[in-house]
Image: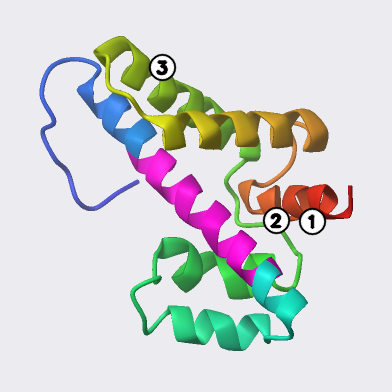
Amino acid sequence: MGTAIFETGPVGSGHAMKALNNYVSAAGLTAACEALRIGARFGLDPALMTDILNVSTGRNNSTEVKLKPFVIPKTYASGFSLALMAKDLRTADELARHEGVPAPLSHAVAALWQEALEELGTEADHTAIDAFLANRQGA
């Protein structure tokens, strides 16, 4: 599993941290996929865009690890399911509600990924959020 181990607090806090981490990851992946679609429509090369993002402030795990091998070539095979990501996003959104913290982006991301799950199915890889966004673009 992981090499970095943190004590997060009482029972359940590790699960909360995992869900919140995946919320930030999913939001970054969604933003990166949207940016590539917008840029490609404008005429920018997605691979070049990724290189520029990766030396700029837009850099994140998705731009560094997921765009070139899984999103740009449309292989959508990173090994983490869209269903698990959607579950973690629901958990993060429910945590915000439970704690009384307004989190409109969390709610929007969770809803978007739930819609993607319903359209793409439980076997889809989480990087297939790009295919879902492409389908919405054509709608």
Amino acid type of the residue that numbered disc 1 sits on in the rendered structure: Ala
Task: Answer few, some or many: residues within 10 Å of disc 1's Cα (few below 14, many 20 plus, some between 14 and 19).
Answer: some
Amino acid type of the residue that numbered disc 2 sits on in the rendered structure: Asp
In the rendered structure, does residue 46 fall within the stretch colored magenta?
no
Residue plotted at (71% across, 51% down): 128
Report helix, strand or loop for mark 1.
helix
Q: Is residue 18 left or right of residue 64?
A: left
Badge 1 vs badge 2, beta-carbon distance below 8 Å:
yes
In the rendered structure, does residue 32 fall within the stretch colored magenta?
yes
Q: Is residue 121 above or below residue 129?
A: above
Task: Answer few, some or many: residues within 10 Å of disc 2's Cα (few below 14, many 20 plus, some between 14 and 19).
Answer: many
Task: Check residue 134 in the rendering and tell me which mark sits there, or answer none.
Answer: 1
Task: Check residue 94 in the rendering and tell me which mark sits there, or answer none.
Answer: 3
- Residue 71 in percent (x, y) is at 67, 65
Which one is earlier in the sequence, the residue at label 1 or at label 3? 3
Task: Answer few, some or many: residues within 10 Å of disc 3's Cα (few below 14, many 20 plus, some between 14 and 19).
Answer: some
Judged by its main secondary structure, the magenta piece is: helix
Q: Is residue 34 above or below residue 23?
A: below
- Residue 98 in percent (x, y) is at 31, 11
Residue plotted at (34% across, 35% down): 20
Q: What residue span does the magenta drawing correspond to?
A: 21-37
Report helix, strand or loop for mark 2.
helix
